Each structure stands twice: as structure tokens, then as C-alpha cells.
Image: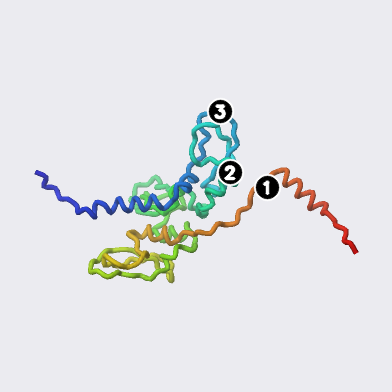
Amino acid sequence: MDTGRRLPLPALLLPLACAALAQRSLTEKQRACLLPPDDGPCRALVPRWYYDRHTQSCQEFTYGGCYGNANNFLTFDDCEKNCWTIKKVPKLCRLEADGGPCRSYLRRYAFNLSSMRCEEFIYGGCYGNGNNFRDLQSCVDHCLPERTGPLLCYSPKDEGLCSSSVPRYYYDAKTKSCKEFKYTGCGGNANNFVTETDCYNVCRKGTQKPRINKPMSVSRRKIMRKLIKKPQMYNQKS
């Protein structure tokens, strides 16, 4: 006879729902752009482009001609078209999380370039690197610069119409921070998140494509240099 305590169905489904939300935070194209370059096992010398998550730019590499991964584009323009939505983050935030050699057990946050999120890790208490924040908000403030978020993030806090008391988070546009509130279980609006992390990751994202300076080819640079030295003159007719 099974005498073990069984969790109610909502408690079992909640972690799965949170995991699904986390997976949707990046599109399939964005996840491909964050893969490391892979030239594959073959030996051809095919010029291709990949998005370098550490330099935050599209770089040329030599593809072997077979296998590899999806971070592989025919041209610079193809790479930029697919990967421009990847957020630019400070250099310090591109470092790998480092727990250090000591044996303390300190909960800290680091920015993860693979998921483009601030995530918890265990810090040993000494050494490590600068990608180490005491709390989630400090990590978000430093590694995810202020950008215009979705309209739902500007909706006022709405506790709903029912009588439950469910801990949730909403984005406060005035203080630019995520705050906890008690959700009654029904009604309300979309400014309602299961975790503080979900709140920050949704409401600190930008949607405007930045202006990109395309690398100039060698031949184009030579032509431009000649034009600068010898500007073309036009005779004005009287």
C-alpha cells in the first residue's frame, strides 16, 4: 500500500510550466546564433559567417562542408538578419560563471550568454570573476541595459477578482523593478508573472533593430580612398 504523500496536480505541473516559459524566452533562430562555431568534420574550405556571442558580432570562419550546426550563414547579411535581435551586453557579463576554488556555499547570480538570462549559481567565496552578483536585480541592472519592454509591462498591478492568495510578480514601470503581490486567482491582467526572473526577462527586452555598420570590402575601401583624395568636379552651366 502506497502511504507516501502525493503532491496536488497544480504543484506537479508548476515546474513544467516554468521550464516551458524559460525555453520560450529565446526563439529558435536566437538559440542557433548562440551556438559555438562548428566547422564540421569534412575538409572543404568554404567561407561562411557565424555570430560570435563573445564579441557580439558576425565573424567569418572556414566551414568544412558537412555537418556543423545552425550558426552557419552564407553571407554577413544573412548572419545579421538572423542574429541582430540578440541583446548586446557588457564585457563583464560575457564571462563564464566561476564558482572559484573555495568551499563556501553562497547563492549568487551570473549572466549566462547561452540563455541570455541572469541565473543562480553557487559561489565558493573566493576568486572567480566579475560576473558575480549578490541578487537578481543587480545582475539584470548591469547585464540587461534599460530597453522598452512589451506594453503589458506598463499595465497597473491587478490582484484580480477571486479570494485566493497566490504570490506573483508584476513590473512597476515607475521604479523600473519587479515587485511581489498577492494574486487572488482569477481576472487581473497580463502583468502577472510566476517568478521574479520571468518578470525581469520579459519586461527588460528591446524590440528595435539597431543600425549596423557592414564591413567594407577591400575593393570598396580602395574606391572610397580615391574619391576622397580626388573628388569628382562638375562644370556648372551658366
- Distance between mark 1 and mark 3 Cα atoms: 28 Å
The percent position of residue 108, horizontal first and vertical second, equals 38, 54
Mark 3 and mark 2 residues within 8 Å of each other at the beta carbon = no
Label 3 belongs to which residue? 43
Q: Residue at x 51, y 47 (%)?
A: 53
* Quadrant position of the N terminus in the picture: top left
Q: Is residue 161 visible?
A: yes
| Marks 1 and 3, the one that precedes in the sequence | 3
Question: In the image, what residue type sits under mark 1?
Answer: Met
Q: Nearer the viewer, residue 166 or 137?
A: 166
Q: Distance between the residues labelled 3 and 2?
A: 20 Å
Task: Using a 10 Å C-alpha cutoff, classify the residue at mark 3 as few (fewer than 14 neighbours), some (14 to 19) or many (20 or more).
Answer: few
Contact (Cβ within 8 Å) of mark 1 with mark 3: no
Q: In this view, does 229 lie above or below 49?
A: below
**x%, y% of residue 157?**
35, 70
Type of amino acid under label 2: Gln
